[in-house]
C-alpha cells in the first residue's frame, strides 16, 4: 500500500475554510508524517483549482488603516489585539502549508520543516482563539487585513523569493514586535495573553531560522550572495523595509548573521 503524500495533504489542509477544522487537519497530517504514514513527494508537480487559501467568510478583510485602534487599557481593545494576533497566526498556518504544496523539487527535509511550522502555527492560533473566547469574542468578530497573505501570493512563482520575503522579512518582524506587545499586555493585567506571546516568540525564532536556512540553501544552489540577493528580491517584490527597534538577540537565534544584522540596522 502506498503511503499518502505529504504535499497533497498540505493542499487539503490549505483549502479547508473552517479554522478549527484546518487546525485539526494539520495536527492529523503532522502526526501521520511523524509516524511515517505520510511521506514527502518532492518531485510531484501539483496544481489546484480550489480557492487558496481556504478561510471563513469572517473576518472581513480591509486595508490595514481601516482595522481600527487597539487601546490596551480597555477589555475591548485587548480583545481586538488578540484577534489581530489570531489572524496573523491563521495566515501563518496557511503560508506554511502553501510553502509545502506549491514548490516542487526541494529536499524532503524542506517539506517536513514547514509541516512542523504549520503545526506550531496551528497551536498558536488555538491558544489565541481560546483566549479570545474567554474574553467573550471569537475569531471573525473584528476587521482584519491581508498584508501577510498578499506577499505569499506575490512570491508564488519562486521559492527563493518566498523564503526571503515571508519568513525572513514579515515573520521576522514578529520577533521585533513581540516583546513590546507582551509588556503592554502584562502591564494591562492580561497574564494569560503574555504567556501565549512567550510561546509564540519561542517558536517563531525557530520558524524564522527555517526560512533563513532554506534561503541560504537556495542562494548556494543558485550561486548567489545572501545579502545582495536579498536586497534585489526586496526591490523586485516591493517588500516593506523593516524598521527598528530590532530584537537582535532573537534574530541571532533565528540565524541572521552579524553582517545581515548590520545591514538591517543601517537601513532601519
Image (cartoon, rainbow, N blue to C red):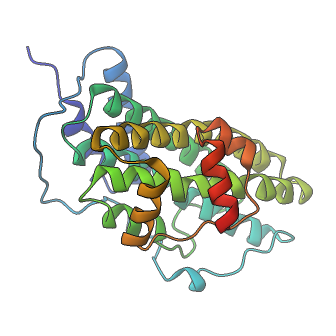
User: Can the viewer see residue 131?
Assistant: yes
Q: Quadrant of residue 166?
A: bottom left
Query: Where does the image place residue 180, in percent across and percent down from the top left?
Result: 80, 58
Up the image or down, 139 lies above or below 35; here it is below
Q: In which quarter of the image is the N terminus?
A: top left
Which residue appears at 19% of the width and 32% of the height? Answer: 42
* Left or right placement of residue 31 versus residue 144 in this view: left
* Left or right placement of residue 156 versus residue 115 in this view: left
Residue located farthest toward the bottom when viewing the structure as drawn: 66
Up the image or down, 41 lies above or below 25; here it is above
Query: Where does the image place residue 16, in percent across and percent down from the top left?
Result: 30, 51
Q: How many labels were placed on the picture?
A: 0
Which residue appears at 22% of the width and 63% of the height? Answer: 51
Q: In which quarter of the image is the C terminus?
A: bottom right
Towards the viewer: 169 or 123: 169
Q: Quadrant of residue 237?
A: bottom left
Query: Where does the image place residue 108, in percent across and percent down from the top left?
Result: 27, 26
User: Can the viewer see residue 237?
Assistant: no
* Left or right placement of residue 144 versus residue 49 in this view: right
Which residue appears at 66% of the width and 36% of the height? Answer: 253
Query: Where does the image place residue 188, in percent across and percent down from the top left?
Result: 89, 60
Towards the viewer: 250 or 229: 229
Towards the viewer: 181 or 12: 181
Amino acid at each position: 500500500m502506498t503511503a499518502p503524500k505529504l504535499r497533497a495533504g498540505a493542499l487539503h489542509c490549505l483549502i479547508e475554510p473552517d479554522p478549527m477544522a484546518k487546525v485539526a487537519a494539520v495536527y492529523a497530517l503532522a502526526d501521520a508524517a511523524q509516524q511515517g504514514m505520510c511521506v514527502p513527494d518532492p518531485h510531484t508537480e501539483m496544481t489546484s483549482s480550489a480557492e487558496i487559501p481556504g478561510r471563513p467568510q469572517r473576518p472581513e478583510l480591509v486595508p490595514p488603516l481601516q482595522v481600527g485602534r487597539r487601546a490596551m487599557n480597555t477589555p475591548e481593545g485587548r480583545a481586538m489585539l488578540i484577534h489581530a494576533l489570531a489572524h496573523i497566526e491563521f495566515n501563518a498556518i496557511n503560508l506554511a502549508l502553501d510553502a509545502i504544496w506549491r514548490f516542487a523539487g526541494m529536499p524532503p527535509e524542506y517539506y517536513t520543516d514547514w509541516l512542523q511550522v504549520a503545526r506550531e502555527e496551528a497551536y498558536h492560533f488555538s491558544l489565541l482563539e481560546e483566549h479570545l473566547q474567554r474574553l467573550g469574542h471569537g475569531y471573525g468578530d473584528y476587521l482584519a487585513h491581508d498584508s501577510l497573505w498578499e506577499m505569499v501570493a506575490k512570491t508564488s512563482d519562486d521559492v527563493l523569493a518566498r523564503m526571503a520575503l515571508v519568513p525572513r522579512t514579515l515573520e521576522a518582524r514578529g520577533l521585533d514586535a513581540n516583546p513590546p506587545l507582551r509588556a503592554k499586555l502584562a502591564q494591562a493585567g492580561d497574564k494569560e495573553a503574555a504567556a501565549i506571546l512567550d510561546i509564540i516568540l519561542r517558536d517563531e525564532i525557530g520558524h524564522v531560522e527555517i526560512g533563513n536556512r532554506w534561503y541560504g540553501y537556495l542562494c548556494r544552489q543558485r550561486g548567489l550572495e545572501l545579502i545582495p540577493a536579498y536586497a534585489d528580491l526586496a526591490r523586485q517584490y516591493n517588500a516593506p523595509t523593516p524598521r527598528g527597534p530590532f530584537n537582535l538577540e532573537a534574530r541571532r537565534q533565528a540565524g541572521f548573521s552579524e553582517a545581515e544584522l548590520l545591514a538591517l540596522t543601517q537601513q532601519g
